[in-house]
Amino acid sequence: MPTQEQIIHYFYRLFRDSGMEIMNAKYLNAFIAVCILLVIVFILDRIFVQIFIKIITKISDKTKNQFDNFLVKNNAAGLTAHLLILLFVVKALPFVLWDFPKTYIYIEKATDIFAAFVIVLLVQSVLRTFSDYLKTMPNFRDKPIHSYVQVFMIFAWLAAVVYIFTVLTNKSPWTFFSALGALSAVILLVFRDTILGFVASIQVTVNDMVRIGDWITMDKYNADGDVIEISLATVKVQNFDNTITTIPTYYLISDSFRNWRGMTNAGGRRIKRSILLKVSSIHYLSEEDITELKNIDLIKGYLDTMDSEVNNYNKEHHSNKTLLLNGKNMTNLGVFRIYIEEYLKQNPHINNDMLMMSRQLEATPQGVPLEIYAFSKTKQWLEYEKVVSDIFDHLFAAVPYFNLELFEAPSNVLAIKREKR
């Protein structure tokens, strides 16, 4: 039975028997061996990749778990096959380069470095698989998992760099860290954003400041939309006009921003809008006015109660009612304010369990602002705008029934006559 050396030098003996020089025979023998190894590696790599993919696919077909599907998606099977083939190459190289021990040392180092890269890529694939899988779970859907993956990958690449350093220099890893300490100022300058982002992402996560899916606004960066990604260095916001704003994670700590999650988690979305009324249209209500307004169902009960209360007060205090100014009176603005509150109470789209009121603000040159402050049940933007529009459509149309007038800036129409020549 032929020995290993005889198998390795098979072509060498053929070349020597044909009269070729020793070194030329060794070079050709090694070249043919390398070619044979490459062919075997190529075939085995294809076979192993297909086998791994088929195994994982069969497992995924039998389980409802999506983890194995993400393994295939992130090429974990292919990288595992590459790693196994690489181990085969490491074992085969000593035989292929039997006659070239010095060359083998360099090739071995190159193989070790390549193996380090493959292992890091495999770790990255597995981490991405975990990330994709966790994002399908409700408890982790809004968590910045991508940031954690990036942190782990930084340590993985750091370990790979240290290993490559030891392979190339044949020195202890502590030598690398000693040199790293000497270059700390340069490293801090180069990796400033990464370090700040790492610290910021930890603070953002621990303090639960931002989650994926949160609606945030940051005027400094023209960001107004939903957070779609939180990474180690940046936060991506998809604005409502479908543009993407990228914000450095660090600035979420150093600058101010508004997170609308509280509104989303609450029982409704706030309505805070004013109606501007002309001051000159505000007046006391006469008996005829009150009688006419009692035809409005929403405030009939209020007017009956207040009318009785006002009459009793004026009788007790002997008020001279030849002028409405004397004694106690109702105003059209006050009654309209009560009407707004009653209208909001019976509106099915308004959350009556939350704060709701109609209040008069300080008068301005544009009139008296009557502010509506309430919360809609819906929090969806489109539905919310419909609710607000319906409310103010009704109130604008209701203003004349209280003998009030809306303020609007006067406009002049200038007619320009062109002279014909």
Image (cartoon, rainbow, N blue to C red):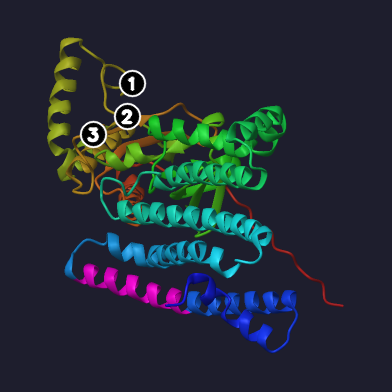
Residue 37, above or below 394:
below
- Amino acid type at image mark 1: Leu
Residue bearing the label numbered 2: 284
Q: Does the magenta stretch include residue 340?
A: no
Secondary-structure class at tag 1 = loop
Q: Is residue 4 visible?
A: yes
x and y, in percent, of residue 56 in the image: 28, 68
Given residues 95 and 292, the one toward you in this image is: 95
Q: Which of marks 1 and 2 is nearer the N terminus?
A: 2
x and y, in percent, of residue 249 in the image: 53, 39
- For image coordinates 63% across by 60% down, the residue present is 104
x and y, in percent, of residue 414 in the image: 69, 59
Question: Residue 354 got which mark?
Answer: 3
Q: Is residue 50 magenta?
A: yes
- For image coordinates 17% across by 44% down, the residue present is 346
Whether pointer 1 and pointer 2 mark residues with C-beta atoms closer than 8 Å, the reply is yes
Residue 376, above or below 173:
below
Provide the major secondary structure of the magenta segment. Answer: helix
Given residues 86 and 211, the one toward you in this image is: 86
Quadrant showing the N terminus: bottom left
x and y, in percent, of residue 170 in the image: 64, 42
Real-space CA distance between mark 3 and mark 2, rounded to the nearest whole angstrom: 32 Å
- For image coordinates 55% across by 33% down, the residue present is 365
- The image quadrant that residue 197 belongs to is top right
- The image quadrant that residue 20 belongs to is bottom right
Q: Earlier in the sequence, mark 1 or mark 3?
A: 1
Whether pointer 3 and pointer 2 mark residues with C-beta atoms closer than 8 Å, the reply is no
What range is drawn magenta here? 43-61
Question: Residue 325 got which mark?
Answer: 1
- Foreground tag (1 vs 3): 3
